Image: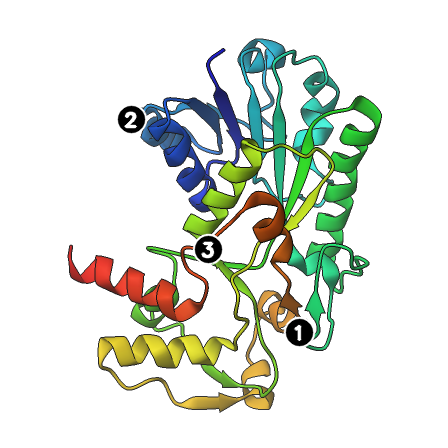
Amino acid sequence: MNKHLFIFGLGYSARFLAKSAMEQGWKVSGTCQSAEKKAELEADDIGAFVFDRQNPFEDTLGILSSVTHILCSVPPDKQGEPIVDLIGEQLSSLNNLEWIGYLSTTGVYGDRQGALVDETAERRPSSDRSQRRMEAEDKWFDLHNQKNLPVHIFRLPGIYGPGYSTFDRLKEEKAKRINRPGHNFSRIHVEDIAQTLWASMNKPNPGRVYNLSDDEAAPPSDLITFACNLLCIEPPAEVSWEDARQSMSPMALSFWQDNRRIDNSRIKNELGIKLKYPNYRIGLIAIFESTENQ
């Protein structure tokens, strides 16, 4: 039968997977949060539905009857995991469903003081946002364990790519070169997210968890310096961690409170992933060159 990918939350990362699926002749549809976004998606031949807790589906089974693959990139809200809460029970009635992917975060591992973390590590989130992610994962796991649904969990670190990178932060004058020795972050290029999801869709292993990350964790200041060198501009003045933290928002502070490196061995060994962008330098050069050629 024809493949049909339905994406809850057609945002930045999910659109790259949608593009890959459509290039392979798949039908793609999904949800957004506004009429304007719906019109934009439909102009790209993506069937779109405005959907959230205030705007649930009127006919869930009718809308999803032909769906073979589901990706959920919608974050949990303060009430919980919205997709499972709204339609979790009905998902088990879909006869054609082969694969479900849930995009979570490596934040569920909490602070590991720079240690390397793989998928077997205990989850011990250190922020409310990451705690909600862990609880959302558990709801999806419950659907797998209790309803035998083909759920896969993908834990993502910082995401970057075209239009969403250090270059954009520099352009917006939001890039701060914070000096905090030994504090590293893992990250993943959006195209490597798409290729990993695509590989899993073609090799399902329900109940499995995958870390998505490139090969080299690094402090954000290194990316800023590297991007500035490509642009032939002076990088922003370095700021000490103690000074920088004084003006940070609660969201930014939560981002900096954890220090860990992410082990990506499983996606390579099980899904055969060869990263297109194994480190930030290769990724930023590609973004720089694509921008230069426009």
Residue 82: where, in percent of width, then height? Answer: 67, 34
Question: What residue is shown with label 1?
Answer: 259
Q: Quadrant of the C terminus?
A: bottom left
Task: Reply above or below: 241 against 3.
Answer: below
Kind of residue indicated by mark 2:
Ala
Give the spatial CA distance, label 1 vs label 3.
Answer: 23 Å
The one of 273 and 109 positioned closer to us in this rendering: 273
Task: Reply above or below: 174 against 9.
Answer: below
Residue 25: where, in percent of width, then height? Answer: 36, 22
Residue 1: where, in percent of width, then height? Answer: 49, 11
Give the spatial CA distance, label 2 vs label 3.
Answer: 31 Å
CA neighbours of label 1 inside 10 A, class few (<14), some (14 to 19), many (20+) = many
Q: Which mark is residue 274?
A: none
Kind of residue indicated by mark 3:
Leu
Answer with left or right where residue 99 lies relative to residue 78: left
Looking at marks 1 and 3 on the same chain, the residue that comes earlier in the sequence is marked by: 1
Looking at marks 2 and 3 on the same chain, the residue that comes earlier in the sequence is marked by: 2
Q: Residue at 40% across / 72% down in the picture?
A: 174
Question: What residue is shown with label 2?
Answer: 43
Q: Residue at 66% across / 74% down in the picture?
A: 259
Question: What residue is shown with label 3?
Answer: 275
Q: Residue at 72% across / 77% down in the picture?
A: 113
